[in-house]
């Protein structure tokens, strides 16, 4: 388990790519379940949605994201890399969610006039931007596209997800 966490962290630091992730259905299912549970808990905690609403939204957004990714990989002839790419994306997302929870907790507990509100907000924005760059790196390596194309693809995917969520 420690080796998998280190692997996902190395991907976050862009030192290794999704090709280093084992092509394991069990790892994909475990990472997917962890991704789902963590994101569901955060969405219920931070939003007015019920558990059922949050579950439906998470399934819709995640399903759309993964379907678009599958389509792109299919068009580019890279579907053999889908499982590793998906595992890397979900694992990195788990790490980013775990990093964002303490910041969200601090942000939610600060008053409107707190001097720390803006720095914490900037840290959350920075974490989002870092996440886009990590995702872009994964797309770059998985699809054999330039880093710029990977980052633009990650930005487009993120904007699409936010549009689906209405944010």
Image: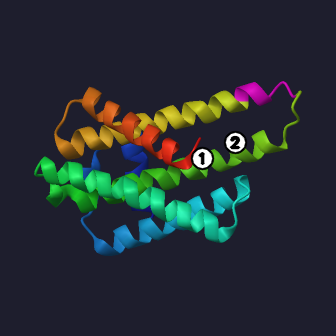
Determine the residue positioned at 53% across, 47% down: 96
Which quarter of the rendering shows the N terminus?
bottom left
Residue 59 counted in the magenta span = no
Is the Cβ of the residue at disc 1 closer than 8 Å to that at disc 2? yes
**Residue 93, position as x, y percentages in the image:** 47, 51
Which quarter of the rendering shows the C terminus?
top right
Which of 42 and 23 lies nearest the eye of the viewer? 42
Residue 116 counted in the magenta span = yes
Q: Quadrant of residue 120?
A: top right
The reply, left or right, for residue 103 in relation to residue 151 is: right
**Residue 150, position as x, y percentages in the image:** 28, 35
Count of picture labels: 2
* Residue at the spot of label 2: 103
Q: Which mark is residue 65?
A: none
Q: CA distance from mark 1 to mark 2?
A: 7 Å
Which of 144 and 157 lies nearest the eye of the viewer? 157
Determine the residue positioned at 13% across, 47% down: 76
Q: Is residue 8 above or below residue 127?
A: below
Which of 164 and 158 lies nearest the eye of the viewer? 164
Q: Is residue 68 above or below residue 40?
A: above
* Residue at the spot of label 1: 99
Determine the residue positioned at 69% across, 31% down: 121
Give the SS element for disc 1. helix
Q: Can the viewer see residue 19?
A: no
Residue interval drawn in magenta = 114-119
């Amino acid at each position: 388990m420690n080796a998998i966490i280190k692997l996902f962290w190395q991907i976050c630091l862009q030192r290794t790519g999704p090709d280093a992730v084992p092509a394991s259905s069990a790892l994909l299912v475990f990472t997917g379940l962890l991704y789902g549970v963590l994101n569901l808990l955060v969405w219920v905690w931070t939003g007015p949605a019920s558990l059922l609403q949050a579950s439906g939204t998470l399934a819709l957004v995640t399903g759309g994201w993964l379907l678009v990714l599958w389509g792109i990989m299919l068009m580019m002839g890279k579907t053999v890399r889908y499982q590793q790419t998906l595992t890397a994306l979900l694992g990195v997302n788990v790490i980013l969610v775990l990093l964002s929870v303490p910041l969200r907790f601090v942000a939610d507990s600060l008053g409107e006039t707190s001097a720390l509100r803006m720095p914490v907000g900037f840290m959350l924005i920075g974490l989002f931007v870092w996440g886009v760059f990590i995702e872009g790196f994964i797309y770059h390596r998985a699809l054999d596209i330039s880093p710029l194309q990977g980052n633009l693809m990650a930005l487009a995917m993120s904007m699409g997800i936010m549009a689906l969520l209405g944010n």
